[in-house]
Image (tube, rainbow, N blue to C red):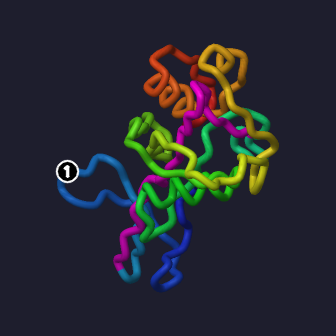
Amino acid sequence: MYAHPVFCTQCGQRLEERHVGIHHEKTVPVCPSCGAVHWIDPKVAAGCLILRDGKVLLVKRGIEPGFGKWVFPGGHVDRGETLEAAALRETREECGALAAIDGLVGVYSYPGRPVIVAVYRATLLPGSPEPFPADETLEVGWFAPEEIDALELAFRSSADALTALLGRRYAAPGGAP
C-alpha cells in the first residue's frame, strides 16, 4: 500500500489527519498551516488482452509487485493520458506489440486496494513486431485458455479479466490487483 504524505506539497509543513466535510467518516492528511487537503486518490492502470488464433498474449513480470508471475501487458496511466492510450503504450513498452483496441473487457477494483484497472480487448496491428520481452518483462507467450490454468497469475484483476474475456474461471492469486 502507498504511504500517506507527511509534509504539505504547498508550504512544507507537517500534515495532520483530520475529518474533512460533514459526512466524511475517514480522515485525510491536511496542512494545519495553509489548509491544503491531500486527498489519497487511487492509482489507475490500463492494459490489453490481445487474442490471436484462439490464444491470449501474456507477459511474465520482471518487476514487483508480481515478479515472475503472468499478466496481460499493462501499467499505470499517466496524468492527462486516456485509458486507451495508456493501455496501448504499456503494451508497446512491455512487449513491443502494436495493437488496436476492440472494446472494453472490464474495470476492476477491490476493497482496500489502491489500484483501479481498466482492461481492453485488442488485436495486433498489421506490421506489429512479434511480441518480445521488453521493459519490465521476463518472457512473453501466447496461451490457449486451458494452458492459463497452469500459470501463476500476478493479480486478481488478471484472473478476473481473463475470466470475463475467455468465459472460464481462472484462480485469483492472493496478491494485489
Label total for image: 1
Magenta segment boundaries in residue numbering: 35-60
Q: Position of residue 98 (x, y in %)?
A: 60, 55
> At x 43% / y 37%, what residue is drawn?
108
Residue 157 sits above or below residue 6 on the image? above
Q: Is residue 1 visible?
A: no
Is residue 44 found inside the magenta-colored segment of the image?
Answer: yes
Instruction: Name the residue beneath numbered marker 1.
Output: 23
Q: Is residue 94 left or right of residue 105?
A: right
Q: Position of residue 153 (x, y in %)?
A: 66, 28
Q: Residues within 10 Å of mark 1 (few under 14, many from 20)?
A: few
Q: Is residue 59 left or right of residue 68?
A: left
Q: Is residue 35 left or right of residue 44?
A: left
> At x 47% / y 53%, what residue is drawn?
44
Q: Position of residue 43 (x, y in %)?
A: 48, 54
The one nearer the camera, 43 or 164, is: 164
The one nearer the camera, 9 or 147, is: 147
Quadrant of the drawing holding the C terminus: top right
Magenta-highlighted stretch: main secondary structure?
strand
The one nearer the camera, 147 or 43, is: 147
> At x 39% / y 62%, what residue is drawn?
39
